[in-house]
Every structure is written in C-alpha cells, then in structure tokens.
Image: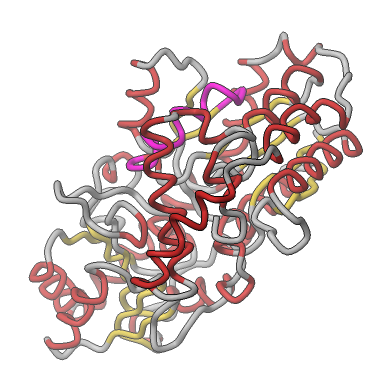
Amino acid sequence: MKVLCVLSQYAYGRPERGENYDYVHFVPALRELGHEVEVFDSGNRSSYRDFAELNAALLDRVIAFRPEIIFCVLMHYEIWFDTLDAIRSHCPALVVNWGTDDSWKFVQASRFFAAHVDLHVTTAPAAAERATALGHRNVLLSQWAASDGSLMRPIPAADCRRDVSFVGSLYGYRAAWIAGLRDAGITVDCFGHGSENGVVDTEAIARIARESRIALNFSGEGPGGHLRAGGGRQIKARTFEVPGSGGFLLTESAPGLERYYQPGREVATFSSPDELVRMARHYLAQPEQRDAIANAGYERTAAEHTYRRRFEQILDHVCMLSADRMRTPWGLSPDALAPAIARFRRSGAGWLRSVLVGPLRLIFGFERGPRAARRILFELSWRCAGERTFRAGGLPGRLFYLES
C-alpha cells in the first residue's frame, strides 16, 4: 500500500533536539512491511508562513501521492480538522492517528481527534475505555514497541561499559531521583536534553542501553515526565526499546506493565526513590540474575513487541473498519481548503496576541513569554471552545505559529 506519514521529523520540530521518535521508528517499520512510504513533516515551521500554508501543502501532497493510508501523529492543532474532513470526504485514503501520551492528553486533544479520523490508536487503556463511553467506535488499544532493525541480543554484565544509564529529558522528579542514586554512590551516566552529555541519536540510544548494566526508565505522565498530583504513571516507548536493544531495564512501575512483561523475570521495577536505590544496588551486585532478566526481556520483545507486529494489526484493523469508505472516488482538490483558509486569515484577533504576550514577556522573558501565552490560550481554548480549537478558526493556531 501507499502510506503517507504525517509527523514531525525532529523532536518538537527543532533539529537541535534530534530526530523525532515517531519518524525514526514508525517510518522504517512501515517500509519493512513492504509499503511505499512518503513523509510529510508536520513539525516543520521554517518552510511555511503559517498553518494555512502548512495545511495547503499537506493537501497538495495527498493529491499528488494518492495514498491509501495517511498515518498521522497529531500533536495539537497543526493539522486542521477541516483538512482531515476534506480528505475523508473527497478521497478513499484512510486516516489513522497514533495518539501520544493519551493517559493525560486524551481529555484535551485525542477525544476530539477521534471524531475526525478513521482510526485512533492509543497506548492508554483508560483512554480507550473513555473513548467507548463517549461513543467512539474507532479507537484501538495498542502499545509502543521496539524497532525490528534495532534488535540486539544482550551482552553479559561483565562486558558492559557503564553501571547505570538514563536517556531522556531531565525534567521534573527525574533529576532528583537520579541525584539520589548518585548520593548513594551509584554512577549514573545521563544523556538527553538537559543532561551533562546532551542529545544523542537513535543508534547511540540503543548502544548505551546495551552497554549498561542497568538502563533506567521513568514513567511519570505529562509534559516532561512529571508525576501528577495523583501519582500518575504510564508505559513509555523506552519500556520496549531497552529490552529490544539488549539492555537490562529497570523501570518505574506503570499500570498494565504486567500485560507486556513479567516484572522480576523479564524487566525489573521500582516505585519510589528508595526502592530505585535498593534495586540498582541489588542488580549491580547480582550480575547473573541481571543477565537472565536481560535475556528473557529481549526474547519477549523480539517475539511479541516489535513495530512490525503492531502496524500489521493496526493496518488490518483500519482496512476492516473502513472497507466501505475505500470505495470513495478521488475528488479531492486544493479548493477544498479555500473556506478554511479564509477563516484562518480573517482579521480582528491580532490584538489579542499583543495583550497576552506583553505582560508575560515581562515575567518570563522575550522568548519564553510568547510560549507561556500560547500555553495559557490553548488551555483556555480546549476547555471553552472544544474541538473548534483544532479547526482553522481556532485562536491558538491563528495567533501562535512558531511557538506551537
């Protein structure tokens, strides 16, 4: 099949943050399944003047490529519902969205996304249940996985170069818990945004995990991996990446983890800073037990938790779910977005940006002020305006482009 992937090539659309997880793992997996794949970089802000040009460019790409599947990773309002609705009304291409962080993002975004795609894929069981309660019948529960091309068997603990490693952004409680390990005399090498070693590429991530006696993972929900007031945790992509690349995973516990791995046999877990220190000390002192768990985790991952298996299930499901729509004739044209673009470009709201940004620049600075203003407006918009936030006339997208 012809598959158009609509996602960001770089993390947060910024090349300095490294290649985006979805781009690195999803695109090769679809190609390995034999599909003809093209990518539309929805995180690219430099090639377009605003979201109107970005959405028009996406429509042009769909018309030129004529995909059978459009596989999206929608973040916020970068791809309008107007665009998705036009595609689904005027051509047979089936639209799939992979929902990221639905454990906390379902309420503010994904519950709206689901009504404008043929299939919404979520990794959060609670989000899937809530979607059913809201009347959505096109939500599929899946999960993160490991890339088939990065599978590597573990090496013995004795051959590892590092004691403990962590790859990820050092936000929230993560830095404090890692500091606790170091205070206990355990050496931890950190990589990623905000760490002493900085951002590393995908190949390095796999190598670091495999060459560490312990590869650490946190499960906190929300932006930056913060814990919510209720102590929310979720399964992360790293949960599968580490065992798949031959690493020994010591991960913070998360609901549903036992559906994918046996804690204590295929991965190791912790739930508090003190338990993290105890478990790290235990497995550093027990290399044979560490090696047995690393090997069992690898075998389970290679057999059940690869993106090849995940995407086979997803594509089979969407084709079965939307078989009737696949017979829709191609009638999509660039004019389909003309009314939406007119709504986007109408005048009268520019003053609001100045009102929001001015005071916040005094508080947060010249660069952070506009980002704070966008965040406040978005939080107000999805609560008050609902799905209109994600349409061409939505205020966050009209007022904030580069900051989005």
Specify whether 369 is left or right of 17.
left
Q: In which quarter of the image is residue 341?
A: top right
Quadrant for the C terminus, please.
bottom right
404 or 341, nearer to the observer: 341
Residue 33 higher or lower than 172, as above or below: above
Chief SS of the magenta region: helix
Q: Where residue 134 appears, x then y in whole percent?
A: 38, 16
Q: Residue at (33%, 41%) from the top-left corner?
A: 103
Give the number of callouts: 0
Q: Position of residue 242 (x, y in %)?
A: 42, 64
In this rendering, would 292 be left or right of 385? left
Quadrant where the N terminus is found in the figure: top right
Residue 253 horizontal/vertical position (percent):
22, 53
Relative horizontal placement of residue 138, taking residue 225 as reference (left or right)? right
For image coordinates 81% across by 25% down, the residue present is: 336
Q: Against 154, is 48 above or below?
A: above
Give the image quarter of residue 132: top left
Task: Work out whether residue 207 or residue 80 is closer to the camera in this orientation and state it.
Answer: 80
Q: Which residue is nearer to you in this view: 316 or 16?
A: 16
Residue at position x 45%, y 68% from top? 246
Q: In the image, is residue 339 above or below residue 361?
A: above
Extreme residue in the top direction: 324
Report x, y in % for residue 260: 35, 44
Q: What residue is at 44 percent from the left and 64 percent from the top? A: 358
Is 118 part of what is drawn in magenta? yes
| Residue 143 included in the magenta stretch of the image | no
- Colour treatment of the image: secondary structure
172 sits left or right of 33 in the view: left
Q: Residue furthest left?
A: 274
- Which residues fall within the magenta stretch? 103-119
